[in-house]
Image (cartoon, rainbow, N blue to C red):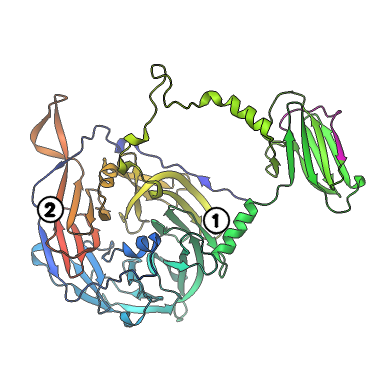
Amino acid sequence: MEVAANCSLRVKRPLLDPRFEGYKLSLEPLPCYQLELDAAVAEVKLRDDQYTLEHMHAFGMYNYLHCDSWYQDSVYYIDTLGRIMNLTVMLDTALGKPREVFRLPTDLTACDNRLCASIHFSSSTWVTLSDGTGRLYVIGTGERGNSASEKWEIMFNEELGDPFIIIHSISLLNAEEHSIATLLLRIEKEELDMKGSGFYVSLEWVTISKKNQDNKKYEIIKRDILRGKSVPHYAAIEPDGNGLMIVSYKSLTFVQAGQDLEENMDEDISEKIKEPLYYWQQTEDDLTVTIRLPEDSTKEDIQIQFLPDHINIVLKDHQFLEGKLYSSIDHESSTWIIKESNSLEISLIKKNEGLTWPELVIGDKQGELIRDSAQCAAIAERLMHLTSEELNPNPDKEKPPCNAQELEECDIFFEESSSLCRFDGNTLKTTHVNLGSNQYLFSVIVDPKEMPCFCLRHDVDALLWQPHSSKQDDMWEHIATFNALGYVQASKRDKKFFACAPNYSYAALCECLRRVFIYRQPAPMSTVLYNRKEGRQVGQVAKQQVASLETNDPILGFQATNERLFVLTTKNLFLIKVNTEN
């Protein structure tokens, strides 16, 4: 059985700033432009039966504004008329109205259990689209930045079961065929088992393909399903389509088509709680091994070889247990006997009296050690010096203990810590894993040809990581740092969306209503500033700015580009000019 490699996230020290002094509030006004929408955004509110935290993560906090990373400052949203609307900004002072690029063929309001419509830009000429009813569209768009060649045409259109939202998609083109691989997220009800929330998360990896030489249509060639108990924070297919990376609080595992999650989990549990092959006990002088024998076993069926540091047990011509013992035994004094209860009892005499064996055979996990109450009491007595009923019995000698009450509330994020896994697309096994307990913050597409980057909290900082599927030994590269942002964002209890510029020049977060916070990277000062405490000149200052939108509608979408922030509400699209030059 292959074991996944545990890969650490290697922080690049030159990208950290240990002397960072914090963000300075700047009152410089930010230019803000407002566009009124012709039709409201097609928001789908959570139903009464979508009451779990996972429903809120996946659908309640859905970002209805989509950024086309293949083209600068181009955003899309879907309105209540089923139209995909695009706004591409060239000049802030001459903003046009959002334009319709495509209209969904189905009536969105006809389906009772529909989800929000979702869209993902697979390449500069391909788009995947879901109408929220369970139908997947693959659309060829032509060059989207070129009005002469842009034309949205449905190339694939199929019902794929229960409603889903699209998490990620890529386009794969080679000499023989063109493929689109996409990830679809569902939250489905447990039919049999009602433990926990009564729901599980399903992530389906669908590949749609067409051979170049044939004139056939695009068709599904592969469908694999991962299941788990938490919505992944991040899930992306590698650019070559050979793997999948996931950041999630609880692990997801591949299941066979039609196999129930509970069946799968029951198998895992049954493997874990399988009855031990043998039981063993020990005293200071000897060890006793008990093995349940098959029916009608006789002493002729049993062959046991004792060596000073080795044991070999054969039952009915089958190898039962063989290996190196943890320590030496007196092999000439060791014996075995068949008991009346149809069990085999083996007595091993220790060479080193008083030595406690942690295992019988080195590396063997098939047996179970049984301790009696006297042994447990002796062990507890030996460990007594490590514990005390007093919090700090000797404050002069010992360092004062850590007091959990001194931790700030924003430093405690139990369920926000995540594990990072890479799955192989062919074997569907985990190949790389990072078991760190870093809080996930957001993802951003820095280079559309690469996988999206993800930002994790490391101590007080927020570190941006770029996945590289081609580098097996250095799969996640540290590419940027937002100083102290991990700490700062934790205090924003009403935050809804989090983003950063693809060139890392600033990070931004918005609350559910009105307020947008912008945190800029440290920049040189035009005037001379001195730090009075340390008596030195300050060369750079990191600015924080706050924008307040003139609306009472909730924020439904949020996207950041190098120059602008786009904020979508039910009836308006706001543009905040953050940087004046590229």
Q: Nearer the viewer, residue 340 or 232?
A: 340
Above or below residue 282? Residue 446 is below
Q: Residues within 10 Å of mark 1 (few under 14, many from 20)?
A: some
Which amino acid type is marked by label 2? Thr
Q: Residue at x 54, y 65 (%)?
A: 193
Q: Is residue 478 left or right of residue 578?
A: right
Q: Is 550 left, or right, of 14 in this rendering?
A: left
- Report the residue marked by disc 2: 580
Taking the spot 77% from the left edge, 24% from the top edge, the residue there is 351
- Residue 315 rendering spot, x and y as whole percentages: 84, 47
Main secondary structure type of the part rendered in magenta? loop
Q: Position of residue 89 (x, y in %)?
A: 16, 65
Q: CA distance from mark 2 to mark 1?
A: 47 Å
Q: Secondary structure at mark 2?
A: loop
Q: Quadrant of residue 142?
A: bottom left
Q: Position of residue 132 (x, y in %)?
A: 36, 74
Q: Quadrant of residue 259?
A: bottom right
Disc 1 designates what residue?
429
Mark 2 / mark 1, whichever is N-terminal: 1
Q: Which range is magenta?
A: 326-337
Nearer the camera: disc 2 or disc 1: 1
Check disc 1 and report its element: helix, strand or loop: loop
Which amino acid is tagged 1? Answer: Lys
